C-alpha cells in the first residue's frame, strides 16, 4: 500500500508513539496500565506548565429566521 505522497507503508502498522513506554505485563496483570498512566501524566504536565489549553470562545447563535 502507498500513501497520498506515493510512498510505501506497512499495512496495519498504526501510529508510532510520541513517548516510548515499555510494557510491564506483571503490572498490567495486577491492574496497573503504565502506558495509560504515562499518557495522563504527560497531559497533566502540558496543562500545568505552559497553560497551552485555552477554552474556545462560543460562536454566536445562528440566525434561523
Image: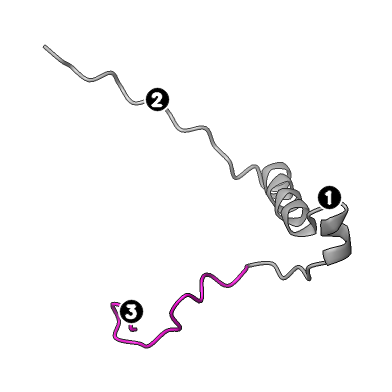
Q: Residues within 10 Å of mark 3 (few under 14, many from 20)?
A: few
In this rendering, position of residue 34 left or right of residue 10 = right
- Magenta stretch containing residue 10, yes or no? yes
Q: Nearer the viewer, mark 2 or mark 1?
A: 1
Image: magenta residue range = 1-17
Q: Residues within 10 Å of mark 1 (few under 14, many from 20)?
A: few
The CA span between labels 3 and 2 is 36 Å
Q: Earlier in the sequence, mark 3 or mark 2?
A: 3
Q: Residue at x 78, y 71 (%)?
A: 22
Q: Residues within 10 Å of mark 2 (few under 14, many from 20)?
A: few
Which residue corresponds to mark 2? 58
Q: Earlier in the sequence, mark 2 or mark 1?
A: 1
Figure quadrant of residue 18: bottom right
Res. 53 mark: none
Give above or below for 15 relative to 60: below
In this rendering, position of residue 46 left or right of residue 23 = left
User: Residue 13, percent across and down?
Assistant: 51, 76
Res. 3 mark: 3
Give above or below for 63 relative to 41: above
Which residue corresponds to mark 1? 31
Amino acid at each position: 500500500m502507498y500513501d497520498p505522497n506515493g510512498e510505501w507503508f506497512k499495512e496495519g502498522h498504526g501510529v508510532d508513539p510520541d513517548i516510548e513506554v515499555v510494557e510491564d505485563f506483571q503490572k498490567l496483570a495486577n491492574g496497573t496500565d503504565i502506558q495509560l498512566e504515562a499518557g495522563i501524566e504527560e497531559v497533566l504536565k502540558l496543562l500545568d506548565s505552559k497553560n497551552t489549553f485555552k477554552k474556545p470562545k462560543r460562536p454566536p447563535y445562528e440566525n434561523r429566521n
